Amino acid sequence: MFISKKVVYLEMQKTGSTHVRQVLKRYVGGKTGERHEQLTDFESVKDRLIVSSVRNPWDWYVSLWSFGCSGSGGFARYLTHAPFSEIRHAARHSGWKAGLSATARAFTRIGRHPRWRKLYSDAENQDHFREWLKLLLGAEGLFIAKEAYASSAIRNEVGFMTFRFLALTTEFNAWNSLGRQTETRQQIRDFVTKHGIARRILRMEQLNQDLHDLLAEIGKPISMETLDAIGKTNARSHAKYGHYYDTETIELVARRDWLIIERFGYTA
């Protein structure tokens, strides 16, 4: 998270957030908190422009997976150590009864959990990506305890990307008390309309242009040439995301991350 007197930037994973934070820190000035942190005290900053970022969901999943293939990222570490990481997560973040329940569910999966390490072994392997995605967005993914995904009702209607995006860009207390337990698409739409806090969303596909417009809006204009010269940070090389998909996995993302596709007009 980046906080200044004029703007608060909420960092969505794999959307160019490191680049955005560095540009804002250089040209706006402010302080940085934990990366990808939720805004727990909305009231204290609600007078400022709250910003986040997004990316084409089909591209986002390839980026998340390939990042794990490089040996990086907390999400890959979590999955490659499942279900034991789920037991640790339940002990740390759940109440006593909920923790016992989550631990019991995790123990029942020992010996039959997916071979996540194999699926993270080759960033060029289409079959590995497709199997990984079908696990993540299918029935197996509903058990993922990270970020309290497995204990939410909304997981039945949205994929992991949308879950993360909503957790970040809606009011913290409302998300935990209401948003996580929404059960229908219309309830989710209504919740976002009422409790969304991000007034501007930067798109990964046109990141510098959106940054340029944001800086102009808050009275800190810089040229596109300057932004382009800075270059993106943490960029990783992998094949174009379309290389990894087939008809089944294209439709899977469309079905699970419908909200982001609907709101921002993304196509495969």
Image (cartoon, grey):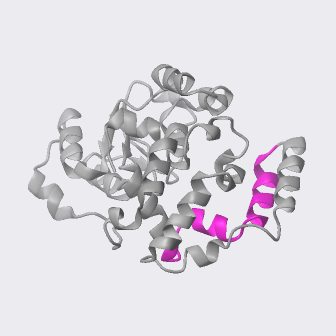
Q: Is residue 14 visible?
A: no
Q: Is residue 93 magenta?
A: yes
Residue pictured at 33% horizontal, 71% vertical: 239
Q: Magenta stretch: dominant SS?
A: helix
Instruction: Judge whether residue 133 is colored magenta.
Output: no
- Name the quadrant containing residue 261: top left
- Who is closer to the viewer here, 165 or 57? 57
Q: Position of residue 142 (x, y in %)?
A: 68, 49
Q: Is residue 251 visible?
A: yes
Q: Nearer the viewer, residue 248 or 142?
A: 248
**Apparent side of residue 96 relative to residue 45 in the rendered image (left or right):** right
Residue that appears at 86% across and 60% down: 108
Q: Please determine whether, in this image, residue 124 is positioned above or below residue 32.
A: below
Image coordinates for residue 182, horizontal then vertical, percent: 63, 28
Among the 4 quarters of the image, the one containing residue 8 = top left
Rendered image quadrant of residue 227: bottom left
Q: Where is 229 relative to 165, above or below?
A: below
Residue at 21 percent of width and 51 percent of height: 208
Q: Where are the magenta residues, as a range? A: 68-94
